Image (cartoon, grey):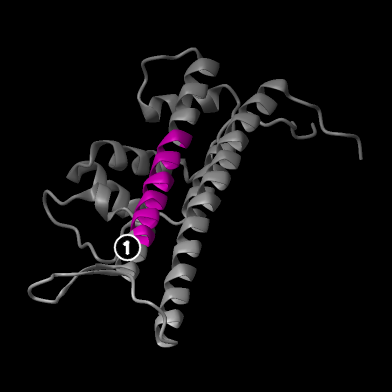
Amino acid sequence: MAPLPFNLLGSIFESGIDALRESFISASQGLQQKVDEAAKAVEDYQTDLANDGEWIGERDPDEGHVIWDQEQVLEFEIDAAREAHGELRKAYAVAAYHYWERSMRKYCKDHKSKHPELVQKAIAEGFPISLDLNRVHRLANALKHNSDSHGTKLQECWPEVISVLFGPRNHMNWYAAIALSDAHVHQVFDIIRESGPRSKLAAA
């Protein structure tokens, strides 16, 4: 089989989203390591206490109740790392959509059209567009605007990214209701990569 023709524009587009993905993987692994290390420290501390190790903390000198102890501090560290991980996922999901939007505006020479029109212009340029791109668009808008309008549209097309702890209601905090996993963010990267020029053109 003859090699597929190379497309420089496609290579540039794919390299950009791949760089975003690699950056996310590195940052995500770093935060997960913090969670794992703090969880191991809690386990070690509990084991040490069970073996008559020294309790670390502070008690109220008058009442005797615990003001803080080492286990609480470590649990706070775990919660903070997990919250940061969630924020990281949301930031990269928005960044991925913005990357697509900026790229299409540049390639299609269009700096004004809204998402639906920009999709049509990208298609007219011959760029394949994933059927799931609308999900990423709705996700980015819900995260940016935190409105009932954008949130309900996201829930209609991608309910899996809405936390089961939240039911739809008026004036809810949609940003907080969105719960992304690493797998969701990789899905966003895949959708964006499939919605633009390709480095290898299909054989004629």
Q: Is residue 14 left or right of residue 109?
A: right
- Write down the quadrant of residue 114 in the picture: top left
What percent of the width, then of the height, locates residue 10?
A: 67, 27
Residue at x-position 71% and y-position 30%: 199
Residue at x-position 55% and y-position 52%: 29
Q: Is residue 57 left or right of residue 124?
A: left
Main secondary structure type of the part rendered in magenta? helix
Check if residue 88 falls in the magenta segment: yes
Q: Is residue 147 left or right of residue 30?
A: left
What percent of the width, then of the height, locates residue 179?
A: 35, 56
Task: Point out the residue furthest to the right here.
Answer: 1
Residue at x-position 48% and y-position 56%: 34
Viewer-proximal residue among 82 and 12: 82
Find numbered disc 1 in the image and state the secondary structure of the residue it sits on: helix
Q: How many marks?
A: 1
| Above or below 185: residue 109 | above
Q: Is residue 7 visible?
A: yes
Quarter in which the N terminus is drawn: top right
Quarter in which the C terminus is drawn: top right
Q: Which residues are magenta?
A: 77-96
Q: Is residue 194 visible?
A: no
Viewer-proximal residue among 80 and 184: 80
The residue carrying mark 1 is 73
What percent of the width, then of the height, locates residue 170?
A: 11, 52
Say which amino acid is labelled 1: Val
| Above or below 169: residue 62 | below
Check if residue 55 falls in the magenta segment: no
What percent of the width, then of the height, locates residue 165?
A: 25, 66
Crowdedness of circle 1 by 10 Å Cα count: few (<14), some, many (20+)? few
